[in-house]
Structures are given as structure tokens and as C-alpha cells.
Image: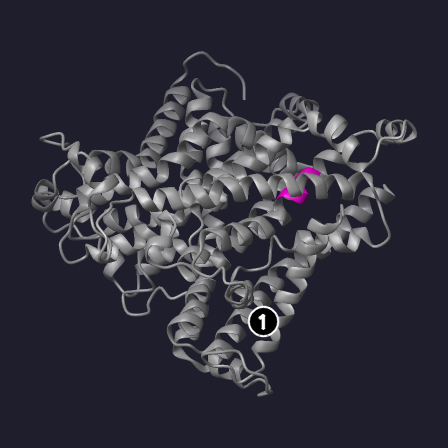
């Protein structure tokens, strides 16, 4: 617990920590190296090894060359699909969650705690309980196999999380502030825009990071409600590994895996600190 | 107007759940139909070999994963709590798997654990030809590959929460214990660990919830195989609903998943309730 210069026990701790860290990094390192090796090279040796020739062409093939089913456009269209679902759904669910969280914490009404309780339970309800109803809703609205359908699902389902986090944050805002503003004649949205929103950046960063990573990484809805060219990148990756099971192309596949993971890794790398802070603060409260 | 998002969210949760429960009591196959078959879908699901294996796997996977990720996370948190250099970098390394999709991590682990191209092949090429690490294709051991990948993926989450907990332990308590001559083991075992109960329970609940609904990771890592050796309830639901076109049975399996989850959540909710009452009365 206390600094003791460099006792043998300190050296042991550093050795232990760095070997565990190496084990955690190993899968990433393996994939990065493989993304730069040719398919022949991987086939001859194992997945684990240093590239003999730097095969940057894997990335070009993964981005716009390889074939899933009959189309040979690489991972690019699926990345675009994921972006077209994730960005709007993140924005909508965060904005609506902020408004709902603000309403629940500062504009109480009869029965609000019941409704709020149900919404929070949504965090725990298995996705599988909602698969069939969503199928019916999407079919009846004509949104099945569309990106709009996925945006709708992620916006509505994201509300459980965004409302919970925003509510827990807004509950600490002094009621007097709101009361004074109301006496001055400000309404719900005026108070929201002028007072609440400017105070909200810490919590909005957390919800945006959370929603973005979750929606980007989501697979079950993507694979259930979309097919072919409409699929998000997670579903396309599974289709890709099934498609190349006969002729292994691990180099290209590794490059595709890296590309698909890059957006969330970057978000985490640059925003992770705020995220962990918000997450742990919420859990310890 | 202002209540629309909230009401919409609550309404969809209630109506969707009730609708799925209702379907689980109907003879629906390819399309939802009305009718009443009592518990027939449930008995059919529970009697099926698929579900039995899935349920046993869930018990094994759930308990092993939760226990091991707790231990790993706690150990990592203690190590990072030793005022070591580069703590921020190390914390990021332990946490980064959390940011990546289960589809990606499952795929990567399926390569590493595949005896033909992964770790086993590497060790063979290095000259140790009798080395065996073929859990991925071994019926009895395959479920452990999912445990390994799942721990790698989410022990960082446990670590982050435990670390925050360790940092918030009252400094006076630690000082008092030090004056009493407590060594590092007694310090963590007797003094610090008891204060971390609330965090431990939060971690257990979150990880159990993940274990029960695990789908993507298994789909990408083993796809339930070899055979059906790594089948899990979430895969059974998907298989029944969208591959075999047995909506009634799929809905029944989904409701069974919910019941398993409730068996975990209700004690947790009761515990939270008691805690809060104690806090307000104290």
C-alpha cells in the first residue's frame, strides 16, 4: 500500500502486471500481425507469427475487394450501414433519454416512479423476449430489412439506459434553480435548453460512448432483421467467416476484423477515461 | 408531449413482454396464431436435448465465468492499487476488450484456440509435437473456451469497479489497521474486502446477466459446437424462432430465459431493498 522504493516484491508485482498485460494484448497483436501477412504464409505456419512480407494489400481487399455471398464490395458497404444505424440511433436515444431523465427527475408527476421503474427494468429484459414483437412491428411498418428499422429499435431500446443515466445525473441538480426559472416564466423546454443542457456534458459523453459502442457492436438484431446488403458490419463479419471457411483467407479476414473494431476502439481510446469515471460513479452510488 | 419518449419506452417493454408470453402459450409455428396449448411449448422445450444441454452449459459457464472474472478483476484491481508506474496505460490494456464487439473477439479467439492454426499449431512448429490444446474441438472442454474468451472480454469491467471501490475505502480505517500491525493479506482480506460487498454484488449481477443472454460470443466462437456441446439458451431461442420456425416454442424458451434471469434478479432486488431501508433508518 505504500511506496517502498524497489524491494524485490515491487519487481515481482511489475513482472506479474506486465505479463498479464501482455496476455490481454496478445489477441490484438496477433490479429494486427495477421492482417499484414499473406494467406499462404498463415496457412504454412500458424496464426501466430511475424509477417515476412508486409501484405498491406489485405486492407485494400478487406475494405473493398472480397466477396460475401454474390457481392464483392468488401467490408465498406457494411461499415457504412453500421455508421448509418449507429450515429442517428446514438443521437436520438441520447437526446430523448436526456429529456426523459430531466422530466423524471425534475418534473414529477403521479405514477412517474412506476413508469421509470419499468423503463429501468428494460436494462435487464433479455433481447430474446423482444425479438418476435419487433419482427411484427417492423413487418407491419414495412421497416423490416431496412436501416431505419434498426435505428428505430436501437433508439427505443436505448432509452432504458440513457434515461437511467441522465436521471441519476439530473437528480443532483438543485430544484431551486428550476423553481426560480419557472417563476420567471420559463417552460419545460426553455429550462431544458438554457439550464439543463449546458450542465450536461459529463453525462452526455458517457451515454454517447455507451450507446455508440453498444449499437455498433450489436449483432442479434442486425442478423435477425436484415439480410445481404442491408446488414451491419457485425453480421457481415459472421457471414464473411462462413463464406471463406472453405478457402481460408485469414489475412484478409484479420484486416476486416481490425477495420470493423476500429471505430469503437478509437472512441474508447479517446473517451474511455470519461466513460470509466461515469460508469464507476454510477455503480458505486 | 414531454412524457412521450418515456411512455413509449415503458409501453413497448410491457406490451412486448406480454405478447411474447402470450405467444408462448399458443400453437404458433411459422406465424403467430391465437389459441391455447397450456404449457405444451414449455414441456417440449424442457424435454428437448438441446435445451437440457444449453441449461447445463449455462450453469457451468455462468458460475465459472462469474467466479473467475470476479477473482481476475479483483486481483487486477489490487495489483493496480500498488501505486505502480503506468497505471493508466495498464488500465486501458485491461479494459480495451470491452470496447470491441463479441463478434470480433469470438472470431479472434476461435483462431487462437483452433488446434489447426492457433496456439497448438504454434507450439508444434516450435518442436514440442506432443503438446495438446484442442479444447475448441473437444466436446467436454469446448465450453471452457467460451469461459476464457468471456473472462478476457469483461474482467476489465470488474477491475474498473473494484479499483474505484479500493480507492474509496476510508483512509482512516486503513491507517488504524496498519497501526494494529495488519499485513497486506489481512489488510485486503479482513479490512478492505468487507467494504467492497456492494460492488461485488453489482459485478455479479451484471456478469450473470451477460452470461444468461450470451449470444454473439458463442455464435462467433463455436456456434454452439462441436455438435451441440456449447449450446446456450440464447442460441436455442434463436434456433427455434428463426431456423426451425417454431415461434411458440421459441417464445417459451425466451420466457424460460427470463425466469432464469428473475431467479438471479429478485434476490438482488430484495437485497437492494433491505439495504436502502437500512440506509434510510440508520
- Which of A1/A240 is in front? A240
Residue at 56 percent across and 39 percent down: it is: A91
Q: Position of residue A166 (x, y in %)?
A: 68, 38
Q: Which residues are magenta?
A: A162-166
| Side of B133 where A10 appears, left or right | right
Which residue is painted at 67% across and 64% down in the image?
A: B14
Quadrant of residue B35 within the rendered picture: bottom right
Colour mapping: one colour
Placement of B56 over or under A6, stated as above or below: below
- Total marks in image: 1
What is the quadrant of the N terminus of chain A in the image?
Answer: top right
Residue A164 inside the magenta-drawn segment: yes
> Percent position (x, y) of residue B235?
41, 65
Q: Residue furthest top?
A: A5
Prevalent SS, magenta region: helix
Left/right of residue A107 with respect to residue A285 in the rendered view: right
Which residue is drawn at the image coordinates 64% and 32% (left, top)?
A203
Q: Position of residue B214 (x, y in %)?
A: 45, 57
Residue B37 is covered by the magenta coloring: no
Please state which of residues B267 and B194 is positioned toward the viewer in this rendering: B267
* Residue B187 shows in the view: no
Residue at numbered disc 1: B20
Q: Residues within 10 Å of mark 1 (few under 14, many from 20)?
A: many
Q: Is residue B166 left or right of residue A48?
A: right
Amino acid at each position: 500500500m505504500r511506496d517502498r522504493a524497489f524491494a524485490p516484491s515491487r519487481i515481482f508485482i511489475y513482472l506479474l502486471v506486465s505479463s498479464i498485460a501482455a496476455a490481454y494484448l496478445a489477441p490484438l497483436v496477433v490479429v494486427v500481425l495477421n492482417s499484414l501477412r499473406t494467406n499462404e504464409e498463415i496457412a504454412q505456419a500458424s496464426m501466430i507469427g511475424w509477417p515476412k512480407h508486409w501484405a498491406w494489400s489485405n486492407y485494400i481487399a478487406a475494405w473493398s475487394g472480397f466477396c460475401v455471398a454474390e457481392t464483392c464490395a468488401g467490408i465498406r458497404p457494411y461499415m457504412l450501414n453500421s455508421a448509418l444505424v449507429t450515429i442517428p440511433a446514438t443521437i436520438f436515444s441520447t437526446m430523448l433519454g436526456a429529456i426523459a431523465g430531466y422530466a423524471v427527475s425534475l418534473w414529477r408527476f403521479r405514477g412517474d416512479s412506476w413508469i421509470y421503474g419499468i423503463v429501468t427494468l428494460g436494462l435487464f429484459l433479455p433481447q430474446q423476449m423482444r425479438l418476435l414483437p419487433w419482427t411484427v412491428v417492423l413487418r407491419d411498418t414495412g421497416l423490416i430489412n431496412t436501416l431505419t428499422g434498426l435505428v428505430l429499435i436501437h433508439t427505443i431500446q436505448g432509452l432504458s439506459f440513457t434515461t437511467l443515466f441522465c436521471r441519476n445525473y439530473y437528480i443532483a441538480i438543485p430544484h431551486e434553480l428550476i423553481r426560480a426559472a419557472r417563476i420567471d416564466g420559463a417552460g419545460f423546454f426553455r429550462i431544458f435548453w438554457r439550464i439543463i443542457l449546458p450542465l450536461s456534458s459529463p453525462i452526455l459523453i458517457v451515454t454517447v460512448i455507451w450507446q455508440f459502442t453498444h449499437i455498433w457492436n450489436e449483432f442479434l438484431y442486425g442478423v435477425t432483421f436484415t439480410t445481404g446488403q442491408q446488414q451491419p458490419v457485425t453480421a457481415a463479419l459472421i457471414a464473411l467467416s462462413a463464406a471463406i471457411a472453405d478457402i481460408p483467407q485469414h489475412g484478409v479476414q484479420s484486416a476486416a476484423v481490425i477495420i470493423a473494431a476500429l471505430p469503437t476502439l478509437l472512441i474508447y481510446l479517446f473517451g474511455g477515461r470519461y466513460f470509466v469515471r461515469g460508469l464507476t460513479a454510477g455503480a458505486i452510488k | 408531449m414531454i412524457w412521450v419518449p418515456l411512455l413509449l419506452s415503458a409501453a413497448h417493454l410491457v406490451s412486448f413482454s406480454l405478447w411474447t408470453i402470450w405467444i408462448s402459450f399458443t400453437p404458433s409455428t411459422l406465424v403467430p396464431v391465437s389459441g391455447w396449448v397450456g404449457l405444451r411449448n414449455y414441456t417440449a422445450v424442457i424435454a428437448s436435448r438441446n435445451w437440457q444441454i444449453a441449461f447445463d452449459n449455462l450453469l457451468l459457464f455462468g458460475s465459472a465465468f462469474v467466479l473467475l472474472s470476479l477473482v481476475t478483476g479483483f486481483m487486477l484491481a489490487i495489483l493496480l492499487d500498488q501505486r505502480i508506474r503506468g497505471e493508466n496505460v495498464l488500465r486501458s490494456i485491461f479494459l480495451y476488450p470491452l470496447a470491441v464487439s463479441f463478434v470480433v473477439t469470438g472470431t479472434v479467439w476461435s483462431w487462437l484456440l483452433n488446434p489447426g492454426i492457433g496456439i497448438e499449431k504454434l507450439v508444434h512448429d516450435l518442436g514440442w509435437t506432443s503438446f495438446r490444446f484442442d479444447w475448441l474441438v473437444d466436446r467436454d472442454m469446448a465450453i471452457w473456451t467460451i469461459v476464457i474468451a468471456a473472462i478476457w472480454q469483461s474482467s476489465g469491467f470488474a477491475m474498473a469497479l473494484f479499483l474505484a471501490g479500493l480507492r474509496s475505502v476510508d483512509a482512516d480505517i486503513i491507517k488504524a489497521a496498519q497501526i494494529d500491525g495488519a499485513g497486506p493479506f489481512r489488510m485486503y482480506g479482513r479490512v478492505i474486502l468487507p467494504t467492497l460487498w456492494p460492488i461485488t454484488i453489482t459485478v455479479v449481477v451484471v456478469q450473470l446477466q451477460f452470461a444468461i443472454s450470451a449470444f454473439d460470443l458463442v455464435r462467433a466462437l463455436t456456434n454452439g459446437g462441436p455438435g451441440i456441446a456449447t449450446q446456450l439458451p440464447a442460441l436455442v431461442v434463436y434456433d427455434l424462432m428463426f431456423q426451425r420456425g417454431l415461434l411458440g416454442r421459441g417464445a417459451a424458451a425466451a420466457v424460460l430465459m427470463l425466469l432464469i434471469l428473475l431467479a438471479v434478479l429478485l434476490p438482488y432486488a430484495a437485497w437492494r431493498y433491505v439495504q436502502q431501508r437500512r440506509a434510510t433508518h440508520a
